[in-house]
Amino acid sequence: MNNIPEVKDKELHRIATTVLIYKPDFTYLITRRALHKKMMPGKWTIPGGGLNIDDYIHLPPHSEGAPQWYGALENSMRREIKEEVDLEIGKCEMLTDLTFIRPDGIPVICFSYFTPFISGEVKFDQDTEGDTIDAKWVTLEEASRYDLIDGIWDEIKDVENILKSRK
């Protein structure tokens, strides 16, 4: 508890999503964070990122009466996947949520999803300052050999259990 940074605003949170992309053979896409990243540089994780107002503000609102939009998180996830690895994905299903406080005192809530791989070859977007520097398709066992961000291996294991229970 002593290492928790001071929170600047207890009401506001940064909203982020992560997406575990899987193939039918029970392989999962993990990506490596760039070494210049402030949070967990060089660690292996799964694609994702923050919700941006542009993920919904330019879309027509759900109703005429109030400016409200459905599907902002899915828009954000699909944008992040396109930017980070340039893949087409299927329907996203929520797995869990996670909260943490960044070193700069900004609280974050992260919604973790999983989705099937549809198509494409992993390519990194040059417009994102090289946030992702490597990617691998791995099995659950192989994933345990990577320097993963805490909790990612458990998410992969949980998704594998879900997928195997559906077979």
Image: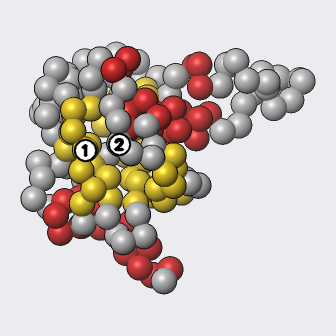
| Side of 18 relative to 30 (left or right) | right
Q: How is the image coloured?
A: secondary structure
Disc with the residue nearer the chain's start (1 vs 2): 2
Residue at 46%, 56% in the rendered image:
117
> Can you see residue 5?
no
What's under tag 1, amino acid-wise?
Ala
Question: Is disc 1 placed on a helix, strand or loop?
Answer: strand
Q: In this view, does 36 lie to the left or right of 114?
A: left
Residue 60 sits in quarter = top right
**Residue labelled with disc 2:** 122
Q: Which residue is drawn at 79% across and 26% down?
A: 61
Q: Classify mark 1: residues with Cα within 10 Å, few (<14), some (14-19) or many (20+).
A: many
Q: Quadrant of the N terminus?
A: top left
Q: Which residue lies furthest to the right in this view?
A: 64
Find disc 1 in the rendering and name its residue: 135
* Residue 38: percent from left, percent from top: 19, 22
Query: Is residue 143 among what the camera can see?
Result: yes
Q: Is residue 48 above or below residue 35?
A: below
Cβ–Cβ below 8 Å for labels 1 and 2? yes
Percent from the top left, x then y, of residue 15? 46, 31
Where residue 6 appears, as percent x and y from the top left, is 25, 21
